[in-house]
Image: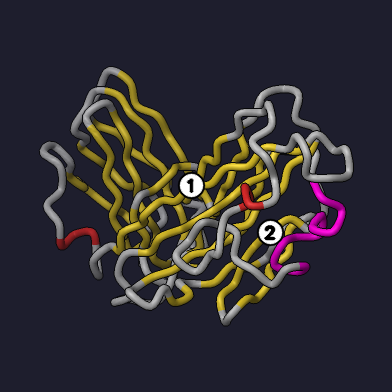
Amino acid sequence: MMLGNAGGVALVQKLDRTASPLSPGPCQECHSNGNFNPTVDIKLISGGVPVTSYIPGTVYILQVVINANQNAQQFGFQAVALHGAANLQAGSFQNPPLGIAIRTVNNRSYPEHKFPSLQDTFRLEWLAPAGGTGNVKIYAAGVASNANGNSGGDGAAFSNITIEEDGASSLENSRPTGFKILALIPGQFIDLQLPDQQGVVTLVDLQGRLVNTKSHQGTDRMSMDLNTLIPGIYLLHWRGPSGMWTEKILIP
C-alpha cells in the first residue's frame, strides 16, 4: 500500500476510487493485481442478517470484506452509497469505529480506512435515506497489500450491490403462505404461525439493534417473549428454508 495513500485515497487524492460512475478509475489504477487474488464482498446487515432492501430512516451496518489469500499483510477500502441518474448521496454514514474515517468528495460521503488495517473486514453504520429515494447502489473497492511501502505487488478489487427501497410498510406486500401473527400481547408475548417447520425469528429496533432472537425446529408455531421491550415500532424478521420475511410491528 503506497505510503502516500495509507491514510485513505479520498483524503490524499480527493478522488472516488470505488469504480462508481463518479470514479476516474478504481484502486487498480495504482495497485497491481499482485498475487493475492482479492475480491470485495459488500453486505448491508440488520440484526445480524444481510438484507437486500432498506426501510427509510433505519440504521443498518455496512460491511465490506476484502477476501484475499493468506499472504496479504494489510488491507484498505473505500465505499460510497449513491442513488438516481445524477448519482446523488444516498443516506448517510455515521459512527465510524477506530480505523475508519468518513471523507467528503464532491458532496458525497466516502468511508475509508484511516491507516492500513491488519483486518480484512470493515463495518460502520449507514442511515437509510428518506422515503421516495428509490434504489440505492453501494460501491466499494479494496486493497490487499504486501506492506512493502509501495504499490508494487499489491492486489485490488471492486464490487457493488443494489439495495431496493421497501414500501411504506412491508404489510403492503402479501405475506408468505403460512405466515400469521396469531396474537400480540403487549408486554407479554407474540404468537406466530410460520411457513416452515424450522427457522429463526429476530426482533430488531429501528436503530438496527437486535433485541430478541429465537429458533424453531419441528413446529410451525412459536411464541416470543416481549416483556423486556419498551413500547415502539420493531422489525419482525423470519428466515427459513423456503425464504425470508420482514415486517414492522407496533408494540403499544
| Part of the protein shown in magenta | 1-12
Q: Residue at x 21, y 27 (%)?
A: 196
| Residue 72 quadrant | top right
What x and y, as percent, mark residue 188?
A: 39, 50
Q: Which residue is mark 2?
A: 112
At mark 1, the secondary structure is strand
Q: Residue at x 25, y 41 (%)?
A: 192
* Disc 1 from disc 2: Cα separation: 15 Å
What kind of colouring is applied to the model shown?
A: secondary structure
Q: Quadrant of residue 220?
A: top left
Q: Quadrant of residue 137?
A: bottom left
Residue type indicated by callout 1:
Ser
Q: Residue at x 69, y 32 (%)?
A: 34
Q: Which residue is mark 1?
A: 159
- Residue situated in front as seen by the camera: 229 or 185: 229
The amino acid type, in three-letter code, at marker 2 is: Glu
